[in-house]
Image: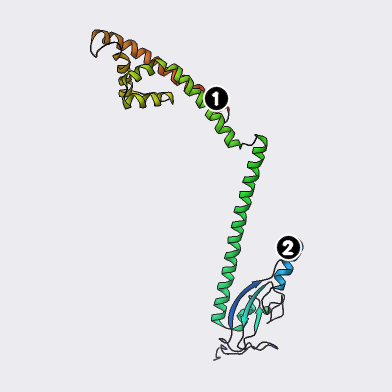
Amino acid sequence: MTTTTETQEIFHKKFHFGAPGSFRFVGIWSAPGSGTREHNISAYNDAMASRPAGCNMSCACCGMGIIHHHMVRDSNNEQFAVGSSCIEKLNDTVLLTASKKAELDRQKAIRAQKRADKRQENQRKVEAELDAERLRNDGLTDHEVMRNKRDALENCAVEQREDVLDELYTSLRAAGGNFARDMYRQLIAGHVPTGRARSILIEIMTKTSGRANSKAYKAAYPVNEAKFDALMITIEDINTTTQTKWDQLGG
Ligand SMILES: [Zn+2]
C-alpha cells in the first residue's frame, strides 16, 4: 500500500515552493492582449510596466508562456506566478480553491464587461439612429414626427366634433352639472354614449321643449332621439375617417 504524497515538497531553482500550506494565493493578473498591443501601444506599455511582481509572461513552475498569472507568495515572502494548470502541482487545496475562485470571478467580470459593452453599443446605435432621424426631419425623431401627425389628426377631429355638437353643447350648458360636463368632454373625444347615458342626454335636449311628461316634451322626445342618433353617426364617421388617415400614415 502506498501513502499519499500530500506533504511532498516541490523544488524550484529560485522559489521555495515548500510543502502545501507554505504559500498563499495573491490573485490573478492578466497580461494585456495582442489587440491592445496593436491598437493602443501606450495602454499596453502602461499595463506591462505596472504588472505585479513575479508576472513575467511565463509560468514559474514549467516555464510555459502564460497570459493569466496566478500569483502566489511563498514561505520566504517571494512572489511568483504560475499558470492555471501548474497551480495544481503545488498540491495545496486551500491555494487551489482560492485560485479557482479567482478564476471564476475573473470569468464573471469578463462576462459582466461584455454585457456592459453590448449595452453601450446598443445605446450608441440607438443614439446614431435618432441623430439620423433628426437630420432627416428638421430636428425631430421619427417618433416625434408621428406623434405630431397624430396630434394634428386628433385636434382636427376634435374641431369637427365640436362643430357637430354645437347645438347639443348649448343644451348641456343649460343643464349644467358634472354629468353634462363629463359627457361633453367624452363626446368631443369621440366616445359615443349608449344605454342610460344616451337616454339622459336625449332627456336633457328635450327639457328645453318643456317639463318632463308634458305634451310638448313627449312630442319633442322622439324628434330629439332621432337627432341625437344622427349626431352620433356623424361622430362615428369622424372617428372612422380619423382612424383611416392614421392607418394610412402607418401609425
Ligand atoms: Zn506551468
| Residue 236 found in image quarter | top left
- Determine whether the residue tagged by mark 1 lies in a helix, strand or loop: helix
Whether residue 37 sits left or right of residue 212 in the image: it is: right
Residue drawn at (72%, 65%) of the image: 43
Amino acid carrying label 1: it is Lys
Ligand 1 lies under 8 Å from the Cβ of mark 2? no
| Residue at 36 percent of width and 12 percent of height | 226
The vertical placement of 192 against 17, above or below, is above
Instruction: Give the quadrant of the C terminus.
Output: top right
Q: Position of residue 140 (x, y in %)?
A: 61, 36
* Rendering coords of residue 103 (x, y %): 59, 71
Location of residue 46 (image quadrant): bottom right
Q: Residue at x 67, y 87 (%)?
A: 15
SS type, badge 2: helix
* Residue 251 visible to an observer of this rendering: no
Task: Identify the residue position indicated by label 1 in the image.
Answer: 245
Determine crowd level at label 1: few under 14, some 14-19, many 20+ residues with C-alpha closer than 10 A. some
Mark pair 1, 2: CA separation: 54 Å
* Residue 132 appears in the rendering: yes
Rendering quadrant holding ligand 1: bottom right
Q: Amino acid at mark 2?
A: Gly
- Cβ of mark 1 under 8 Å from ligand 1: the answer is no
Q: Earlier in the sequence, mark 1 or mark 2?
A: 2
Question: Does residue 23 lie above or below 157 as drawn?
Answer: below
Q: Is residue 105 above or below residue 81?
A: above
Identify residue for label 2: 35
- Closer to us: 31 or 10: 31
User: Is residue 87 toward the left or the right of residue 170 in the image?
Assistant: right
